Image (cartoon, grey):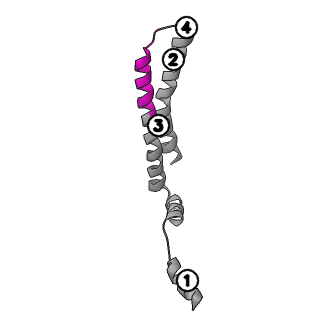
């Protein structure tokens, strides 16, 4: 599971690192690698991919870890008797 999560992380973060290096060359050495509008579009697309990778990581955890599924369900799904049933038992 760790290999898959790290692989997805590198897959989406590596293009952003390349864009940053190109921007550094563009600003420091005044090389016209790509124009500002192309940089903005590329950054937006890579950021969208990073956003989707967070959702993808959640599904990786759910698919590969029984303990994660059980903990998640324990936090957000009611189990056992309802609170109404407990109130009746206490008031009797």
Q: State yes or no: discs 4 and 3 in contact (Cβ < 8 Å).
A: no
The secondary element bearing badge 1 is classed as helix
Task: Note whether 71 is above or below 59 in the view shown.
Answer: below
Q: State yes or no: discs 4 and 1 in contact (Cβ < 8 Å).
A: no
Residue 57 on the magenta span: no
Identify the residue at image location x=55%, y=16%: 24
Do we see residue 81 in this rendering?
no
* Residue wearing tag 1: 87
The range drawn in magenta is 32-47
Residue 36 on the magenta span: yes
What crowding class fits label 2: few (fewer than 14 Cα within 10 Å), some (14-19), or many (20 or more)? Answer: many
Q: Earlier in the sequence, mark 4 or mark 1?
A: 4
* Residue wearing tag 3: 50
The label number, if any, that marks residue 29 in the structure image = 4
Label 1 to label 3: alpha-carbon separation? 46 Å
Label 4 to label 1: alpha-carbon separation? 72 Å
Identify the residue at image location x=49%, y=27%: 16
What crowding class fits label 1: few (fewer than 14 Cα within 10 Å), some (14-19), or many (20 or more)? Answer: few
Q: Where is residue 6 in the image (x, y as percent from the top left)?
A: 52, 40
What crowding class fits label 3: few (fewer than 14 Cα within 10 Å), some (14-19), or many (20 or more)? Answer: some
């Amino acid at each position: 599971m760790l290999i898959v999560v790290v692989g997805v992380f590198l897959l989406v973060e590596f293009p952003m690192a390349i864009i940053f290096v190109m921007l550094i060359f563009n600003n420091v050495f005044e090389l016209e690698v790509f124009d500002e509008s192309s940089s903005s579009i590329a950054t937006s697309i890579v950021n969208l991919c990073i956003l989707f990778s967070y959702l993808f990581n959640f599904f990786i955890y759910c698919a590969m870890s029984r303990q994660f599924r059980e903990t998640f369900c324990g936090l957000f799904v009611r189990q056992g008797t309802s609170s109404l049933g407990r109130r009746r038992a206490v008031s009797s």
